[in-house]
Each structure stands twice: as C-alpha cells, then as structure tokens.
Amino acid sequence: MNYFSAVAVFFTLICSSRTHLVKEITTEGCSLPADLVAEIRSYQAKVDEIVNAVVNGSHSKEVWQELADFTDDFGNRIAGSENLENAIDYMVKRSQWHNVDVHTEPVSVPHWVRGEESATMLLPRVKKLSLLGLGGSIGTRLPDGITAEVIVVEDFDELKRRASEAKGKIVVFAEKWISYGTTVSYRSKAASSASKVGAVASLIRSISPFSLNNPHTGWQSYESGVTKIPTAAITIEDANLLLRIHRRGIKIIINLKMEAKTFGQKTSRNTIVQLNGTSMPDEYVLVSGHLDSWDVGNGAMDDGGGAFISWYAPILLKKLNLIPRRSVRAVLWTGEEEGLIGAFAYKKAHQDNQIVLAMESDEGTFNPRGITMKGTNKATCIVQEIVKLLGSINATTLELSDDVGSDIMIWANTKVPLAALKNDNERYFWYHHSDADTMEVEDPDVLDRCLAVWTAVAYVVADLSVRLPVG
Amino acid sequence: MNYFSAVAVFFTLICSSRTHLVKEITTEGCSLPADLVAEIRSYQAKVDEIVNAVVNGSHSKEVWQELADFTDDFGNRIAGSENLENAIDYMVKRSQWHNVDVHTEPVSVPHWVRGEESATMLLPRVKKLSLLGLGGSIGTRLPDGITAEVIVVEDFDELKRRASEAKGKIVVFAEKWISYGTTVSYRSKAASSASKVGAVASLIRSISPFSLNNPHTGWQSYESGVTKIPTAAITIEDANLLLRIHRRGIKIIINLKMEAKTFGQKTSRNTIVQLNGTSMPDEYVLVSGHLDSWDVGNGAMDDGGGAFISWYAPILLKKLNLIPRRSVRAVLWTGEEEGLIGAFAYKKAHQDNQIVLAMESDEGTFNPRGITMKGTNKATCIVQEIVKLLGSINATTLELSDDVGSDIMIWANTKVPLAALKNDNERYFWYHHSDADTMEVEDPDVLDRCLAVWTAVAYVVADLSVRLPVG
C-alpha cells in the first residue's frame, strides 16, 4: 500500500470514528488477577490528587488559560503557514518555561492557501452565498471567476441519473446529513464526481447537522486522471434554498470566485514533550492532539483543546511530582488536517515497540465521560479498572470501538492499544472546520475535568507494575 | 406623549416581551357561566376540523409551502426597500388568487441602507471580524474608514468609570447576555453612550445567547443632541476575544468601514386581508405579523412564520367554509423593525372600537403550546376555555402576561384584549436579526400546528355569541 492509499484508508477511518463515539459498549468478561485489580485500586489517592489539583486546586483553569492565550495570540494555524511555525516555536518556549523536556521533529507538509473567495447567486435573484473553499481545491480563473448555470442534486445517484444535464454547469450537492462518516464522502468526492460528468465547479452542502449560516471547510482530494475543478462548501441554508428553487424548475446562475492555490511542500514540525519515567523511561504512554488547524475560526476545539490537555498532562504530573515508572510523552501533531501527515512521519521515524498506549483527544473536549478504547481484552479491562477511579467527576465509562482518535489510527493495524477521550461531543460538528471553532466552545471547568481524565489514565498506565498487554 | 416617545416606550415593551414568554401563569378564579362554557365546548368539532385539515388533511404543509415560495423568491425585506414593496404586491396578488378580500394602506417608513461594511482587527494581529451595522447607524468616512484604538468594557458602568480613556477610541461593549429585554439596551444605547465620552465608534457584542459566529443587527436610535457615531454588532466570539486581549493590557487597533446611510422617508403599506363575518362584520378579530424584516437572512422566522399563519387564517377558514359571525382580519404590518411604524399608522387610521381581540405572532413559530394573553379576567377565562379544545395538538396552555406581541402593544394601554402565540421559542434569539433567520428554522409540521392554534382561536372568538369582555 503506497502512502496515498494509506492516507485514503485512514481518512475513511477518521471520518467514521466520530460517528460511532456515542455508541457505548462496556467491557464484559474481564477476569483480571485480584492483585492487579488491588494494585489499580491503590491508585485512588493519586488519581484524586490529580483530579483535585485541576478541579478545585491550585492548577484549576490553568490549561484553559494556556489555550486562551495561545489561540488569542495565534488564531488558526493551517499546515504550511508561517503562523503555525510561530505557534510551534511558542509551544517550545512555553514548554521550556514549564521546565519540561521538549523538542521538535521535521515533517514535510502541503501548503494550500485559500485567498479571497466568493459565491453570488445571480439568477433568479442576487444573493451572496456564504462560502468556504475546500482544502486542496484549485482556484477559478480570475478576476471574473466562473459564471454558470446550476444543477442541484441530493446525492451521487441523482448526479449519475442526470449526468447528461451537468456539462458546463456548477453541480451543487444538497446531500442530507446522516453522520459525519457517511456524509463526508460528499466533501471528499464532490469535485471529481462532478468533473467526470463535465461540470465546471462543485459546491457541497456543509458537512454538519446544524447551522447558523456557517459554512464548514475540510480536506478533499482529486481523483487521479480526472480534470480538477474548483470545489467549495456553502451553508446548509443556502444549499437547501438552491435545492428548492431548482426543484421548481427555475434557472439558477451562480458566479464563483476562488483564489485558492497549492504551493510547494513546506517543512513543519511535530512537537514532543517528554516526562521521563523513573525505571522504564524507554517505554511510554503517548498522549496527543494536533496543533495545526483549519484556516478558519481559531482552532480552539479542533484541536486546541485536545492538544492542550495532552501537552499539559506531563507538565501537570511534573508540577505534582507524580513521576511514573514509564515515560509520558505528549506529541502535538502537525498536518493532521491534510491527512495525518505528522503522525505518519512520526511512525516512520520511531519504528520501535515502546508505545504502551497511544492516546489522542481529537473529538472535542466537552464534558468528559471516560475513555474510548481499542485493544486486547486484558488491556481494555485494565483501563476499565482505571477509569473506575474517576467516579468523583463521573467519567467512569470505558467504551470499546475500532475507530479511536485520528492521528493514532495509523497504529490501528498494529498491536499498539489506542485510547480517545469519550466526551459529550454531540455538538462537535456544529463548530467543526468553521469560523465557529473558537474559545466559546471550551469551558474552563469542563476542560479541567478533561485534563484530569487524560492525566490520570496516562499516569496510572505509565506507572503500573505491568505493561498494558498487547496479546 | 409625542410619537417618538411612544416609539421608545413601546420599544421597551417589545424588548421585554420576549423575556417573559416562558413564564407560565394559568388563570385562576374563572367563574364563567355554565352555558358559556358549554357553548365554547360545543366548538370542539369545528376546532378538530381546523386542526385535522392542516395537520393531516388536504391543507397540510400549505402554509409552509407558501412561506418557502415567498422567502425563496424575495429574501429579506427591509422597510424602504423596493423588494418589500414587490413582496407586498405579491401578497396582494396571492390573496386574490386565494379569493379573499385584500387591500393595502399606505405607511411612511424610514429608508436606511446598510451598504458594504467591514471590521478588521489590525493589532495585535490581523483578523477580520464578522460585522453587522445597526439599523439607523451613520456610516464611517470612506474609503479608509475609522482606524482607532479600542477600549473594551463589560457594561455601561465600566464605561462611566473609565470615561477618560475612551476619547478618540472605538468602544467595544462585551456585555453579558442576561435576557433580550435587559441586554438589548446595549444595542439601543451603545452609540450615544460611547459618543458622550468622546468615542469615534461603538461595537456591541451581538444580542444573543448563542452564536456560531453570526452577528445580529437591530434598530438603534441616537439620543437627541449627542454626536452621532457609527455603531455595529460583532459576534459573541469576537467580542469575548477582544475583551480577553484588552484585559491582558495588549493594545488593540480596529479599522471600521461602513457605507450605512439614511435616505428620505418612503411609502410602504400594511396589507389587510378580510374574511367578513356573517352577522357582525364590523367587529373583528385581528390576526397579525409583520411582513418587513431585517436586511439579513431571509426573514423566515422574524416574522415570516408569524405573518404567514396570520395571513392564512382567514384563507383557511374560507377554504373550510367556516365563516364566523364577526370578521377575521389579517394585518401584515410594515415597518415593525424600525419602531412599529405600520401599527401606529393603522391605529391612527382606524380609531374605532371594533377590535374584539388583537392577535400577533412575532416571537417565533416553533412548537405551539397555546396562547399568551393580556386582558380582563373574563376575557382570559374565555380564551382559556377555547385553548382547552386544542388538546389533540397539546396546545392547551393559557399564559398571562403584560407583554404580548410587538406591534399590537400599541393597544396595551387600551381595553383591547391582546394575544400572542405561546411556543417553544427558547432558540428564537439564536437566529433573530441574523443571516441564520432562514427557512431552516421553520418546520412544515410545526407551522401547521401553529396555524391550527391561530386559526382555531381566531375563529371561536369571532364566532362566539358574546363579544370578548373588555370590562
């Protein structure tokens, strides 16, 4: 499997991961040795110490304040941008200020720049449409853009049936929201599907279940050998408006202007913070989130919250002088949005067998409920015992899933156990990849509880007498 | 009280009305004559006929389709615009198509035009702010706009305390949302308050409890004798961002450009549809909503839904051949957003004593619960008996309030009983006066139930043997 197929496969995995998170499955048939259960339960005092430190104690609201300072200063951080590199420099300095070991590792990332863009319905009446070009899209010719008649379809099947009508037109996909995993195919495949039937551009209904007229961007890729056409997302409201008008048989004409352009690859960096273990420092629990974001909103939710609770876990442990036997390594991925680029680079550079548990929080840091996990029965049973220690913040659920995290899914076909933060993320896709992804989504108290879950699980797994079983 | 004071008073009333709607008060101490109660209960079959006709019957989804056709064709409809007048012409023709009596009455309305507008934070980093100028605002000088340092305050008191810092600056009000009635004072008074301390422009946090980065406009008025300065709303997200940066002591500079301009008065029209009563045609139940909207979104919720269930009530009664003894008169107000202009004109032109009950739906057409009312004990007891007939759609609540409707509040100090549609409008202000006010807010089945409540109450009140008591 070459690199690009891998990206495609893992994209499918990421996409579907968000869909299944709400499905709660509890482990059954756990038969851990009594002494191991007793050992895990003996961590109650230390878990309480972590929880109390952030929920009511001297480290309360610290991680939210760090995230607010960061996103307020830098705003959004798309791969390839100077701003992302400045933000990484800041995280290195800030880690040093917190007195933890930090280094970065180079990663080659794509460099796509949106530029100015607009869409205006010219017929049957003039109306500006809220628009976000999709990542990787080509631009339109400028300065006039593309002015063309519109065909609106509700799904790929309708486009096939009406293929003969699409030539020279802008295809609008007014697909219904089913789930992210299902519906996102309209984002990734709209342009190539429309191009194959002769369309000059494609617009999709934003991939979201709810809208206050906010469009949602996201990566898309052109099928090899198919003519590239400009592609963008419009709002749910405007897509449905166009659909209604089109169904009445009324002619619609849209003018689309996009300056979007892909430049040569740039060098970005994964950022790695390490708290060395006392007796087995080469083995480590990996806690992670991605520091890059889309070029809209402030990237506070996707994935500021996840990146910051991961970054702060080893820092907090050090502040509390809770140094586990194994290491806790926070990795802030780069280039996640363009296809887990940073994670693939990390995996290539670290072909070891030292990851005890790979954790990633990239599905929101709303009210935490526990952990979603993929691993052996024994491993998941151990983590289930660990989350039982989080009763004071009601985060005791252990859910099993094949779809865990985004970047860490690159280890899905290995024996590395994987864990994600289970949280009340029903509204995640309201904000996702849109200008609404801001600090308003992140609540200081909630983020503290997420940090407590994240740090406690990483700490206990890293400190246990036994390594999390992989077989 | 002169005209403008009246507007101010009634504005306060409208503003607070939305706040209290969720407070449920049931009538107590009703002692209606047994024969009157029996008479009201005898309307059960006719009320069921109305409900069934729209909920499951041959008129199901008709009103939603009418509203969709209308808002899709015309979009938003601000007072003074040619588009509003075209929309009124359409409603006249459409009423004639439905074979009901229709006429219009002229109203002089303000003509404010937004033009292009933008706000960009230049320091500490460049960021475009989503912006909507407030209705009635003056523009900035052009083409450069106003570039000035920013002072961010959380309330009027803070501005007073820091008055000496405001001179030559842009004042940003990052006021907290409490309720519409309370918080809207920041929209109406921001400009004059800021101007009095020497500011060059004012920006407010949008008057809304929830945001996906959508700004909310609305009318504002300049205090007499105070220098007019440009004023606009930014999003909750951006206001809080500016507040956090400002609290850190970091200098903020914003460039504000607004083409906003007020032109001379224009002639608009109230649209009046009448179903004449069989025996007392001069007496009438007035059912109403406003046809004008803000110049953003499509005005489907504010007040498309309310206007259309009112417009369709007499049409539906005629289609069902349910002609009451008194008339049912639908009035589609113009110029509501600029200060109940159409309603004041109507009241001046119709100084009669023939309004049996004035109804207005202008607080959303979400799932209906019944009626909110202001009137004598006897009148409210009668309407309470009437809404009991709406058990099949669970809309049996009669709530008492001093704040009922918007336009109809011009009769608040008279004996005319007033009624509004009580509905599950907790999210009303998410959409209000923003680009998110579209057909997505309006559900066909829910709108049918709203129409059923509205039509049934109007019909029974118009047909009862007794006129709704005013004393």
Image (tube, coloured by chain):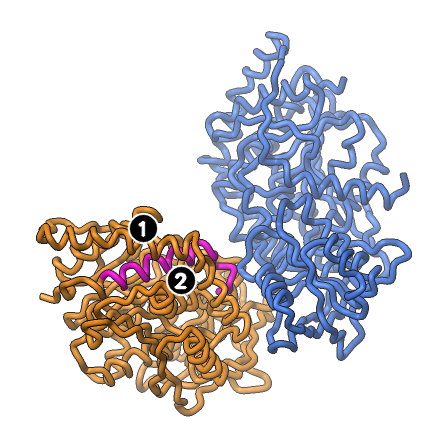
Chain colours: A orange, B blue
Residue lying farthest to the top in this orientation: B34
Residue interval drawn in magenta = A437-460
- The residue lying toward the viewer, choosing from B109 and A399, is A399
Q: Which circle marks residue A395 in the picture? A: 1
Image-based side of A328 in relation to B329, left or right? left
Cα distance between the residues tagged 2 and 1: 36 Å
Query: Mark 2 or mark 1, which is nearer to you?
Result: 1
User: Mark 2 near mark 1, Cβ–Cβ under 8 Å?
Assistant: no
Which of the two residues, A383 or B193, is positioned nearer the viewer here?
Answer: A383
Q: What element carries label 2?
A: loop
Is residue A243 something one can see in this rendering? no
Residue placed under numbered mark 2 in the picture: A175
Residue A456 belongs to magenta span: yes
* Marks 2 and 1 share the same chain: yes
Asked whether A337 falls inside the magenta stretch, the response is: no
| Chain ID at mark 2 | A
Within 10 Å of the Cα at label 1, are there few (<14), some (14-19), or many (20+) other Cα atoms? Answer: many
Up/down of B309 relative to A396, above or below: above
Q: In which quarter of the image is residue B20?
A: top right
Relative to B364, say whether B465 is above or below. above
Residue B378 at x, y percent in the picture = 68, 17
How far from the left and from the top, in percent, is residue B314?
64, 34
* CA neighbours of label 2 inside 10 A, class few (<14), some (14 to 19), many (20+): many
